[in-house]
Image (cartoon, rainbow, N blue to C red):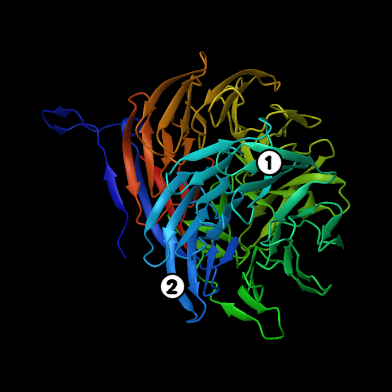
Amino acid sequence: MREPILTLLLWGVALGTSGVAQVPPALRPPRFAVGPERLVAGAISHSLTFSPDGRLLASGGDQGDVVVFDLRAGEILRRVPASYHRIGGLRFSPDGDRLAALGHDLTVWEVATGQELLREPSGSPGALDWSRDGTRIAWVGSDRVVHILELASGSITRQSPDCKTIQVTALAFSPSGSRLALSAINGALHILAAHDGALLRSHQLTDTPVALTWPAGPQPMWVASTGSNRIFGRSQVLPRRCRTLLASEDGERVVVSSSDTDCVLTRDGQRSEWTGRSTAIALQADGSHIARATDRGIEIQGLAPGLPRFLDPAHHAAPRAAAFSGDGRHVAVDTFDAGRRLFRLRGLDLEEVDAGSLPSRGTLLTPGDRPEIAVHLDSEQLDAENRFVGQLQYWLPTADSAVLSQSIDLPRGFEDPSPVGRPRLLANGRILSLGALHVDLEAEPLRAVGSRSHPSLHLAISPDGATLVGIDPSPSCIGPGYGKLMFFDPDGQRSAKLHIERLPLGLAFTADGRQVFAPTTDDLQVYDVATRELVATHGTSWQDVHRLPDGTMLGVESAALVLWDVAAAVEVARVDFERRILDIALSADGRRVLVLHRDRLRMVEVTR
């Protein structure tokens, strides 16, 4: 196995008459030390789709890979690295020759060869559909705008029907491909002209639509909502938290999927149910089989009597998130099939220890200067009676386990009005960021900071705590920007906003608090905090950024870590990996970085 390629950009040292002068450690350039790999096996699928002829099944994973199975041969036909983000949507072209995958980008692949034919930025996965005439692809990304791609010309029409922040829950082309239906979380159902995105008509539903399907022939469009549902012309009770609604081409069968139940409805009133958690579901065009992704693998189930068939689940990655203990001696890792795992650091190596009662649910967080590992639990993971909307727990690793040392309840009133991004601890563990809501954990009683009315991705706090910066991903009604850079004072009052054309993938203040680094898919942007203006761009493509305690910036590329000198505006150290980086965890002291790859972990140390 080829080792990472380590490249250092070294500074010159002064030469005296008696030899090379000794450089004080504080003046030495930073560098990377790389530890050994540790394999972590596992599997998960977040999207499934059959080819039109039913011969192939495509599966999209949490780590951005897409696997195409040949069901007749019972083997993997193709594996493509579509994205470094979760694959939220998959669709075959009507002729079955191409496959569209929606993750961080929309990608289109030739099935026979695995050749990438097209790539368009998306930001994050949303709804996706391919018209039945094969001429158009529609999707919704992180900007919450509907994108309609004309495959023949390559032109893209962007449309936000009511020109304000809406979260699109589903979309579907009409059987002819001339219209596009989309449902929104505000209860709206819009019908657009597919050729130019023009709004044809809108309907306001009494309940929130969560999924829809538009079968061929004379069948009506069916919408699954949080309330009453009429399918096959009669009222249907659907599973709670419905997320997917699929119909066979003849409209005789409908599949409804939720977080804990999947069911099939037929026109003659029959109903079949499968209980147990599934992460994705697909229905064959002729309605004869369904595919369900579960913790046992991918299950192919015939709707007629027969035994289920399982596909090999080991094609998707295991590690998905990690966090250090505050003292940097332990690291907890989330995996998909092995629950939560706890490791003790031995130099740059990882020694697995018993995780004890460390909860398998919730989000792992590094708690600043506290010695524990932090876990955030939301209301569904915590309290069936909904007395609290969340809880922050601190777990102290011991010699052979982990024990709960403290918990902080988030009472009613701390609901996140716009849940974007995953929870994070900021300002050395003082601020719990939950999307649009940010909680000061040291206040008595707890208080919110930032603005509840503006969702804030990648919130960053200046070193002196005087300025907060976040990203509002909602589209602008007055310009083509993908969002806004939002500036807040410590009391949560918005002091300025700046329209941006490319959505940053992360934010970090410089050590003096005068500038904010904002990497995008195309470049690294630097904003002046005082003037609220873009002051510099650098031709480097990072997917995240962190400030280390010495003021150096740590940049995360798709397959590399970079150290960036802010004053000189140059890269001073770099380590390249032969595998894509899925995520990283940074220790509180900024000295260690745990790199998560598709099926393995690696510890990296920043030294001088």
- Nearest to the observer: residue 201 or residue 314: 201
How far from the left and from the top, in percent, is residue 137? 53, 50
Query: If the image is split into quadrants, where does the C terminus sit?
Result: top left
How far from the left and from the top, in percent, is residue 113? 36, 65
Q: Earlier in the sequence, mark 2 or mark 1?
A: 2
| Residue at (27% x, 42% y) in the render | 8
Give amino acid for label 2. Leu
Residue that badge 1 annotates: 167
| Residue at (70% x, 42% y) in the render | 190
| Residue furthest bottom in the image | 306
**Neighbours of disc 1 within 10 Å: few (<14), some (14-19), many (20+):** some
Residue that badge 2 annotates: 77
How far from the left and from the top, in percent, is residue 123? 53, 42
How far from the left and from the top, in percent, is residue 468? 61, 25
332 sits to left or right of 598? right
* Element carrying mark 1: loop
Give amino acid for label 1. Gln
